[in-house]
Image: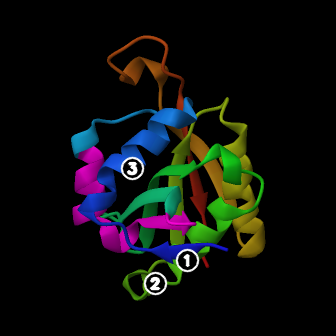
Amino acid sequence: DYHFRKPNKADGADVWEMIKDTGVLDLNSSYSYLMWCEIFSDTSIVAVRENKIVGFISGFINPNSPDTLFIWQVAVNESERGRGLGTQMLFQLIERPICEDVHYVEATISPSNKPSQHLFRGLARKLDTDCHVSDYFASTDFPQEGHEDEKMFRIGPF
């Protein structure tokens, strides 16, 4: 039912709207989504259903760890949740030629974000590998009050 592809800058506005509509993800500037869709398209993905973007993952290969794909955000339209779309997009990404040397996936996740924790723990199970969780950003690292801590989830090696 889904068509997976690399995003392009024409997708940036739709991705920004979808992330805004989730109401739970940190909404970055519209400019940042244009940049993600243009510059980081090889390591990002959109899922399209009936000519509408219903899923998006922004990611990049960590320049300090070229064997690691860092996932910045995973967004799934509310109408598509519970169908395994996040997992499908992650597998589509790690199977791309640019990820040939990738053996780890990392993401930071706040303690209250149970769906993302479930997604990445599930990815580790499906890849039959480890999921290590460690402290990463403290709430006091953020410039505004009210942001939760962020834990680092490291999946691999695979």
Query: x%, y% of residue 53?
Result: 49, 59
Left or right of 154 on screen, residue 42:
left
Position of residue 37 relative to residue 14, above or below, is below
Q: Pointer 3 and pointer 1: residues touching (CB < 8 Å)?
A: no
Q: CA distance from mark 3 to mark 2?
A: 23 Å
Residue 157 occupies which quadrant of the picture?
A: bottom right
Position of residue 4 relative to residue 148, above or below, is below
Q: CA distance from mark 3 to mark 1?
A: 21 Å
Q: Quadrant of the N terminus?
A: bottom right
Q: Secondary structure at mark 1?
A: helix
Task: Give, as a single range, the part of the protein colored magenta.
Answer: 32-51
| Residue 48 lies in the magenta-colored region | yes
For disc 1, the neighbor class at 10 Å (few under 14, some 14 to 19, many from 20) is some
The residue where tag 2 is placed is 96
Q: Quadrant of the C terminus?
A: bottom right
The residue where tag 3 is placed is 14
In this view, which residue lies farthest toward the top?
Answer: 145
Dot 3 amino acid type: Asp
Residue at image location 23% in from the left, 63% down from the top:
38
Query: x%, y% of residue 91?
Result: 60, 75
Position of residue 55 relative to residue 45, above or below, is above
Residue at image location 40% in from the left, 50% down from the top:
15
Q: Secondary structure at mark 2?
A: loop
The residue where tag 1 is placed is 92
Query: x%, y% of residue 65?
Result: 36, 67
Camera-nearest label, 3 or 2: 3
